[in-house]
Amino acid sequence: MTMPELKDIATRPAFDVIVVGGGATGAGVARDCALRGLSTLLLERDDYATGATGRNHGLLHSGARYAVADRANAAECIAENHILHTIANHCLENTEGLFVGLTAEDLEYQSVLVESCRQAGIGASVVTADEALRLEPALNPDLKGAVVVPDATINPFSLTHANLLDARRHGAVTLAGVRVERLVVEADRVTGVKVVEVRSGTTATLHAAVVVNAAGIWGGRLLASAGIVLPMLPAKGAMLVMNGRPCKRVVNRCRPPGNGDILVPDGTVSILGTTSERVDFDQVDDLCVTDAERRLLLAEGQQLVPALASMPIMRAYAGVRPLVADDSDPTGRAVSRGIVCLDHATRDGIDGLVTITGGKLITYRLMAEQATDLVCAKIGLSAPCQTATTPLPGSETPAFIAPRPHTPQRRHGTLAAQMSAIDGDRTIVCECEGVTLGEIRYAINTLGATSLDDLRRRTRIGMGQCQGRQCACRALGLIAQLLNPESAQADIVRFLTERWKGIQASGPDNALLQAQLINDMLDQLGVGHLACQHQQDTP
Ligand SMILES: Cc1cc2nc3c(=O)[nH]c(=O)nc-3n(C[C@H](O)[C@H](O)[C@H](O)COP(=O)(O)OP(=O)(O)OC[C@H]3O[C@@H](n4cnc5c(N)ncnc54)[C@H](O)[C@@H]3O)c2cc1C
């Protein structure tokens, strides 16, 4: 299947809706709009899931983290948690979660937490210290007690692509690598967007009855192009990828959310997070994890799970929360994670424009439902939302359970069956993540991957223990064969440079060997020392 390009749609009549942003929220809006029969276009400036969606813990919240401070938000989380277990089961791992108390203050908080969870409809059961250690032997043996909650984990890349795939199946057009330069406003109404295709520099003006701003933290800038002011607070969070899975469950510290208080298992690794720090807008596209953040996360994390002290750090990465708030909170910790859905006709006197932001990954579907309800009201369409009950592609089988963490089934659910149709499709390309030749073909032909980094987000190639050392060249050979041989060398340089940045930021001792090996590879390609100068990373 060939993916459409800007030139293919530039001459089409106006769409019903244009969605700006290809994170989970934008993908969810595109799916919901398409399922309700609206002609839909989604535009993403980079690749899909390159914003906050691809840079978080992947926690499928039970809501317990918010239950004490924001009960409504917690209730939303548990409701969506249940829905995603039905419609997106192939993207989830049903781990459970523990809130672990280490001090007398933690135990005081524990009783407030349990009561708040009860009021928000979140199942929370207290276990003794011995029982907690039996469940998770790697916990700090001095713990005082724990609470078991229905936390789980979610693969944000699989989730986003399943939404995009379903949107396209229902007639939506989705374009990556197309940046919206500004909103087009005529007589107090947004009528479309001015765009540029990043690769070719081609520009166009595209029209729609309604534009949905799902551009995350960048959404404030988009609105400014129509003279609308929305105060947004870019709150950076740093995370470490630990090379191992000391706990089967998500482990949270039993106290109000703070730095280094959560360890989320993810396949065979674990994500240790996170911090919250306001950063300037000009840093949002160039994040780096500092040595101080790495040390802070480790110091806090080790209190919960002492084994983290001797566990290698595979890499470090950071994301920025799309919070709607002014500058009064210096860290963004206290800012609500609630959904912000704005009709700019009532708020700013500009019709044809909806903003959907704030929220969390776990509430992406509800955010999409709220935004699409507003779009339908503006267009005068009464079509019910179906996304709470219609499974995503790959999750059609109830309670689908993939056999092992690193398999195409885990990433694509039932669709993985299509990936071994041709002889040789089962050939392994990436040993760490179990990526097959058939999966690479599928990621290029059906999910629109055009580079090694795109492949990584669709298949996890290069995200395992070798960080691309073994598989990058093989995958590149396939890209050169199936796509574009000319750009192959530049592509591998870009890919390994990104991998290097995250490894370098993970610290001089733990990752030295890996880092050295990757740098040697980059040196052979003539870019090793260039690569060492950066620290930004992708997870
Ligand atoms: C450190 C951290 C940890 C987190 N942990 C969790 C967690 O464990 N569980 C959870 O539920 N939530 C978590 N979150 C929150 C969650 O990641 C976000 O709320 C969610 O991913 C936001 O998705 P989004 O689609 O709204 O925004 P984004 O994913 O940021 O998507 C916005 C997209 O718009 C695109 N874009 C921007 N401007 C333009 C333009 N002009 N033209 C075209 N495209 C444009 C961007 O490239 C981007 O892809 C975490 C967030 C952070 C930062």
Image (cartoon, helix red, strand yellow):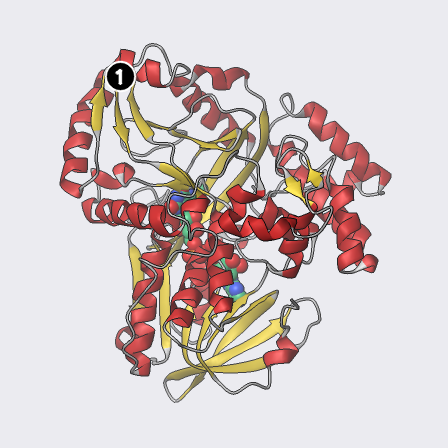
**Quarter that holds the N terminus:** bottom right
Q: Position of residue 11 (x, y in %)?
A: 59, 86
Quadrant location, the C terminus: top right
Is residue 449 shown above or below 95?
below
Question: Could you say which is closer to the camera, residue 244 or residue 65?
Answer: 244
What residue is rendered at 51% in x and 74% in y? Answer: 182
Q: How many marks?
A: 1
Q: Can you give x and y, in whole percent of width and height, for residue 357 in the image?
A: 37, 59
Q: Nearer the viewer, residue 493 or 84?
A: 84
| Residue nearest the viewer, comparing 96 with 496 | 96
Whether 536 is drawn above or below 253: the answer is: below
Asked which quadrant contains residue 287, the reply is: top right
Relative side of 532 to 313, left or right: right
Relative height, residue 125 to residue 406 (above, below):
above
Whether residue 279 is visible, yes or no, is: no
Residue placed most toward the observer, 299 or 132: 132
Label 1 sits on what residue type?
Thr
* Residue, disc 1: 103
Query: On screen, 501 above or below 205?
Result: above
Please state if 252 lies on the left or on the right of 195 as rendered: left
Q: Residue at the location (29% across, 37% down)?
A: 65
Please, what secondary structure does the residue beneath circle 1 have? Answer: loop
Residue 505: x and y, percent? 61, 33
Estimate the x, y position of residue 234 in percent, counting from the top left: 43, 51
Residue 510 shows in the view: yes
Classify mark 1: residues with Cα within 10 Å, few (<14), some (14-19) or many (20+): some
